[in-house]
Image: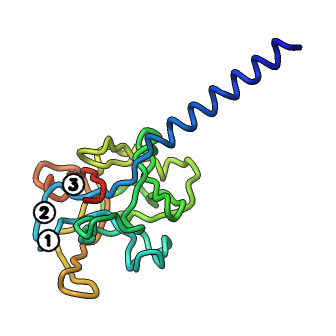
């Protein structure tokens, strides 16, 4: 009986250590396009569409938007948790949602939904390079060439879709991560 208690306590300590280590390694980042393209400030980040910070609605899906990190911190509608990359998830902890596609075909938009471990939410991304759906690694998360402005001329927006990965579109398909400046 005494050995069972030690075993249970040992298993408990192992689980606590594992969870604590994972939480300690968690890093909130923005996912930004490696190429500045036509952005006049700090490049394009993956962002909740039509967002206004904490009032963002995940039902609006994702877009490319001027990054906020030059203000010194990350904004809630652009924060992703790096620990989830290993599980092939693009997880937004402030809203408890994951990126999701309706289909892995060209032109498909990228939405957000409660995380459920489905194939539609599985993306391969190491923190640098392309972001591709696990179900079709030939398709890349891509910002459009056309740009529009948001609430002001400094807020630049691009549609975010899946497109065939291509060297010609590399500037629109290569992503990296960074913490607040």
**SS label for mark 3:** helix
As measured in the structure, the alpha-carbon distance from the residue carrying label 1 to the one carrying label 3 is 15 Å
Image point (18%, 76%), residue name: 147
Which residue is under mark 2?
Answer: 36
Mark 2 vs mark 3, foreground winner is 2
Instruction: Classify residue 82 as left or right of residue 175.
Output: right
Image point (27%, 63%), residue name: 45
Looking at the image, is mark 1 or mark 3 earlier in the sequence?
A: 1
- Check if mark 1's residue and mark 2's residue have beta carbons within 8 Å: yes
Q: How is the image coloured?
A: rainbow
Quadrant in the picture for residue 135: top left
Which residue is under mark 3?
Answer: 173
Looking at the image, is mark 2 or mark 3 earlier in the sequence?
A: 2
Front one among 13 and 165: 13
Front one among 15 and 118: 15
Question: In the rendered view, would you say 157 is above or below 22?
Answer: below
Residue 138: x and y in percent read 28, 45
Mark 1 vs mark 3, foreground winner is 1
As measured in the structure, the alpha-carbon distance from the residue carrying label 2 to the one carrying label 3 is 12 Å
Front one among 84 and 163: 84
Instruction: Classify residue 57 as left or right of residue 45.
Output: right
Which residue is under mark 1?
Answer: 39
Residue 123: x and y in percent read 40, 47
């Amino acid at each position: 009986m005494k050995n069972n208690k030690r075993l249970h306590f040992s298993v408990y300590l192992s689980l606590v250590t594992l969870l604590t280590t994972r939480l300690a390694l968690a890093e909130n980042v923005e996912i930004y396009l490696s190429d500045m393209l036509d952005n006049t400030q700090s490049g394009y980040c993956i962002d909740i569409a039509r967002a206004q910070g904490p009032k963002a609605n995940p039902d609006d899906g994702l877009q490319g938007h001027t990054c906020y990190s030059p203000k010194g911190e990350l904004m809630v509608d652009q924060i992703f948790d790096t620990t989830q990359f290993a599980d092939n998830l693009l997880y937004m902890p402030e809203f408890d949602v994951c990126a999701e596609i309706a289909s892995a075909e060209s032109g498909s938009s990228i939405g957000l939904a409660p995380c459920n471990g489905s194939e539609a939410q599985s993306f391969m991304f190491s923190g640098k390079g392309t972001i591709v759906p696990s179900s079709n690694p030939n398709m890349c998360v891509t910002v459009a060439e056309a740009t529009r402005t948001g609430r002001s001329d400094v807020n630049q927006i691009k549609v975010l879709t899946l497109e065939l990965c291509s060297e010609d579109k590399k500037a629109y398909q290569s992503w990296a991560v960074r913490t607040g400046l």
